[in-house]
Image (cartoon, grey):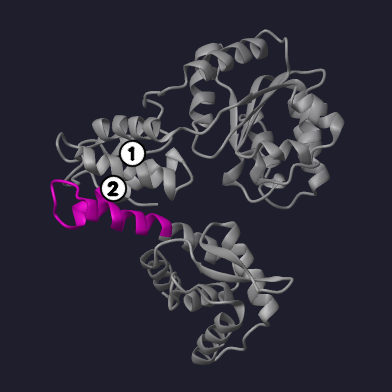
Amino acid sequence: MVTLADDNAVLAAPGALTPSNDETTIVDRESVLREYRTAARSLREGDVSHLFVSGPRGSGKSLLTRRVLAEQLDEDPTVVACDEYGSNYDVAVALANALDPTGEQLSETGHAEETVLATLEDRLGSASGVVVLDDVATIDLEPFLSTVVDATADADVRTVCVADDRSVRNELSTPLRRRLCERELYVGAYDRPTVRQILATRVEAAFYEGAVTPEVLDRCAELVDSSLGGDVGRGIRLLAFVAFVADEDGATRVSLDHVSRAHDRLVSQQIQSHLADASPHRARCLRALLGTSRDDPPRIGPLYETYREHCEADGVEPISERGLHDHLRSLRETGFVAVTSHRTGEPGHYYRYHLAVEPAAVRLALAASDE
């Protein structure tokens, strides 16, 4: 995460570039807001016990949840952001402690999972109000969600589950899905004009007047749409990196070059995070791809030979070609590597691999990983 100084040369209010800033304007969500308000009233009045909210990452689900529940409920909900924890065990501990903040707090380690779930069940049974489980798709769902649903069956607790992937509901057993998804709400992705409008509201709130031109704003919106998966949260982080890079240069106006360099840094940070939990051979896989041409991308054989050369230079034993395939698959799933399929002229086909992100972003990430 980039840290913005209060004396940044282009920023008047750095705090406005925090993605979770609740003072931001909700743009182009009138129909979803109406649906959400209706659903929230049903929760408040006890007509439904569980609401499942889904939609692409960066489509404003969490902001809508906070804003609507604050408007519709008489008391603040109990909120647990599941992506801040490593497992459903950790989320269960966090939720149990949040439900009884003045009672005995469970420690983060040292308990059997059954003990934690039993404590959570007891506290849900005696609690009231709304529990929000944000980013629920980032944890293992069983037996955590079954415990939550069973414990609230006869209690005065309602739940809101927020997920970036609607298909996560299909991983639940049919009885659990019917109860947990008693009411569903889908929040679709923003189109590019709306992305630009949202970024414009943040620019107006955060930057000095005249620091960001319409051309720069257009480019940022284009990158959110084409490179950042339409994720407005990442678009706001892009603006933060833009401000950081411009300040490094001592500039008082943002240029398109600042945007390009900021985008590389943002993607580099994502790559670094991915490599931090992976085998060092995944970084060598990326390094092997750095020296290739996107116009003439390599097949697995030549790529494997380049990878072996890096291993020899590092003085480490290379993994098998199949092992390299596995790392390429992981890099494809995260969007860092792309693959094209080609016919051989006979029955069958082969693949060619190339970077799906700018080489500069990969170089930055590999340099940081080496350090």
Asked if residue 335 lies in the magenta stretch, the reply is no
Label 2 is placed on what type of residue? Leu
Mark 1, secondary structure of its residue = helix
Comparing 211 with 225, the one in front is: 225
Residue stretch rendered in magenta on the structure: 242-267
Mark 1 Cα shell of 10 Å, populated few (<14), some (14-19), many (≥20) = many
Seen in the picture, residue 17 relative to 267 is either above or below; the reply is above
Q: Mark 1 sits on what residue? A: 17
Residue furthest to the top in view is 45
| Residues at marks 2 and 1 touching, judged by CB atoms closer than 8 Å | yes
Report the residue at 20% width, 52% height from top.
246
Q: In this view, does 265 lie to the left or right of 68?
A: left
Report the residue at 84% width, 36% height from top.
173
Q: Is residue 313 left or right of residue 252?
A: right
Report the residue at 62% width, 10% height from top.
41
Q: What type of secondary structure mainly makes up the magenta span?
A: helix
Comparing 104 with 49, the one in front is: 49
Identify the image quadrant of residue 193: top left
Task: Report whether residue 208 is seen.
Answer: yes
Checking the image for residue 268, the label placed there is none
Label 1 is placed on what type of residue? Leu
Comparing 102 with 93, the one in front is: 93
Q: How far across and down, in percent of the image, does residue 195 sit?
A: 39, 34
Mark 2, secondary structure of its residue = loop
Whichever of callouts 2 and 1 sits on the residue coming sooner in the sequence is 2
Q: Mark 2 sits on what residue? A: 4
Identify the image quadrant of residue 159: top right
